[in-house]
Amino acid sequence: MGKLKVISFITVLLMGLVFCSFEHDYYVSITNLNIKKETKQLQVEIKLDAEDLEGVIQEEKGKKIVLEKAGEAELKVINLYLTNHFVVFANGGKLKLEFIGKELTPDGSFWCYLTADLPAITQSIKIKNDILLPTFIQQHNIVNLKSNGKVQSHTFIHKHTTHTFKLDAK
């Protein structure tokens, strides 16, 4: 009987380790915004965990996608998800974000690249960012905004999904 208990304990322990390996300890996205005054453009780079994004899109949109094999139809679904959960306003008006590219890295990160035209004089950028937050309450979305050689950062968390960055008038 003692040997059976030891085998059972080891089996349960190994199963626990296997199931725990499918989750990760942190839920963080990083978004870099770069204001290009000379071209009046906002460049956006969003780094997400690929598996988390796949799961959230399947849950929210009812469509299973594999980012590694994402074609045009899947990219439309990704773009729709992003533009619903990451919204940029300049001087009070909503900007139209254009999806221009993607990259899946070996570490499981999924990078999305977007751009938007800016008004000639931009005094503020307001962000609504709840990417992955409805599903992962512990998610932190870090946004870094670079303008006039200065970087401002803000972290978006559950129930605190909007922030306004004030820009220098230079």
Image (cartoon, rainbow, N blue to C red):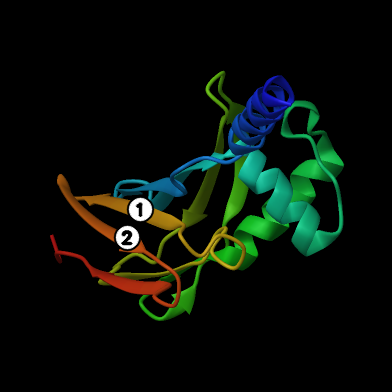
x, y percent for residue 139? 46, 57
Quarter that holds the C terminus: bottom left
Q: Nearer the viewer, residue 131 or 32?
A: 131
x, y percent for residue 121? 29, 68
27 sits left or right of 36 in the view: right
Q: Is residue 27 above or below residue 60?
A: above
Say which amino acid is labelled 2.
Thr
Q: Nearer the viewer, residue 92 or 87?
A: 87
Residue beneath label 2, please?
155
Q: Residue at x 63, y 36 (%)?
A: 16
Q: Is residue 25 above or below residue 156?
A: above
Q: Nearer the viewer, residue 90 or 138?
A: 138
x, y percent for residue 148? 17, 50
Q: Is residue 89 above or below residue 28?
A: below
As helix, strand or loop, the secondary structure at mark 1 comes to: strand
Q: Answer yes or no: do the residues labelled 1 and 2 have beta carbons within 8 Å?
A: yes
Residue beneath label 1, please?
142
Q: Is residue 72 above or below residue 166?
A: above
113 sits left or right of 51 in the view: left
